[in-house]
Image: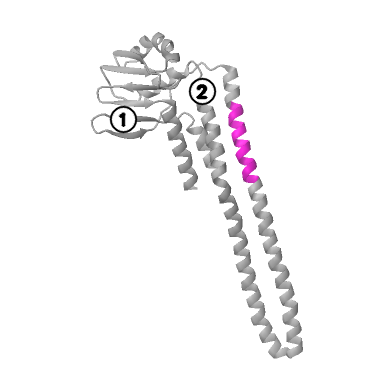
Amino acid sequence: MSRVIKSAFAVAKSPYLVVNNETNCSVVCEEKDVPEKREDDSEFLRQLELLKIEAQKGAAELIAQARRDAEQIAEQIIQSARNKAEAEKDKVFQEAYNQGYDEGLKQGKLEMQKIIDEANEILELAYKKKEEILKTLEPEIVEIIISAAKKIVLLESTNPQQIMYTIRNAFKKINQQEHVTIKVNPDDLETVRKARQDLIDWDVVPYIDIEIDHLIEQGGCIIETEYGSVDARISSQLDEMNRIIKGAAKDE
């Protein structure tokens, strides 16, 4: 489960979806590190860190409580088995005494082995019960992690510099192109227009058109090329993040 928590924050800046026009199919491309340094506001970073701490704390508390409950149930089952074994042992030795030493000893050994086998079965049942309790809580823990990671992505999307970070990373998913169209949320239009020449100077695309799309969330974009498009919308990133976290939970 700790691996799931770590993976949640690793995919908070999620991969993008690349759609090929010719084959009409989609593949997930892995996001690479961005060389440019973002100008993050200190308050924004503080809120981001608080969200991460809150998610980790919530998941850790759930796991700890589940373990305590499971261990308590397991201990009760084990103690019951011990009490039963102790009572049976006294009964066996009393019967051995009453029946005579040799015959009673032989019978006593058989009865004791039976008690040991039963105790082992009860002990195994206790451990299985403990695991079952943890597994029943796992979906709830995963949902807490996903919810926290979504908050992080949505918080980042309101940062004015997020759209440029998104576009630069989306550009890494396309080969050299003569012309592209960048579709953005109206709130990001002015930021992208001011940085248009910087994007051209980045030596990936010589001609860039910028269009408004009200269906695209702030901080995300869609880049259309002659051969396909890169879906870097926030909603697409959240869907992919959800898939990755749940996949990591199933693999544990």
Is residue 74 depicted above or below 201 in this figure? Answer: below
Q: Secondary structure at mark 2?
A: helix
**Secondary element type, mark 1:** strand
Residue furthest left in the image? 22
Residue 156's mark?
Answer: 2
Location of residue 202 by image quarter: top left
* Up-down relation of residue 145 to residue 208 (above or below): below
Cβ–Cβ under 8 Å for marks 2 and 1:
no
* Magenta run includes residue 62: yes
Closest to the observer, 33 or 225: 225
**Distance (Cα) linking label 2 and label 1:** 24 Å
User: Residue 24 at what x, y percent from top left?
Assistant: 26, 33
- 22 displayed left or right of 165: left
Position of 89 compared to 164: left or right?
A: right
> Which quadrant of the view contains residue 186?
top left
- The local crowd at label 2, few if under 14, some if 14 to 19, many if 20 or more residues have their Cα within 10 Å, is many
- The residue carrying pointer 1 sits among few (fewer than 14), some (14 to 19) or many (20 or more) residues within 10 Å by Cα, namely some
Q: Residue furthest front?
A: 214
Q: Is residue 20 magenta?
A: no
> Left or right of 195: which side holds 101?
right
| Residue 136, disc | none
Residue position marked by numbered label 1 in the rendering = 19
In the image, residue 120 sits, relative to residue 3, either above or below, namely below
Amino acid carrying label 1: it is Val
The residue at 40%/19% (across/down) is 214
What residue is rendered at 67% in x and 57% in y?
73
**Magenta highlight range:** 49-64
x and y percent of residue 80 in the render?
A: 70, 66
Q: Is residue 10 above or below residue 95?
A: above
Q: Position of residue 100 (x, y in %)?
A: 74, 91
Q: Which of marks 1 and 2 precedes in the sequence?
A: 1
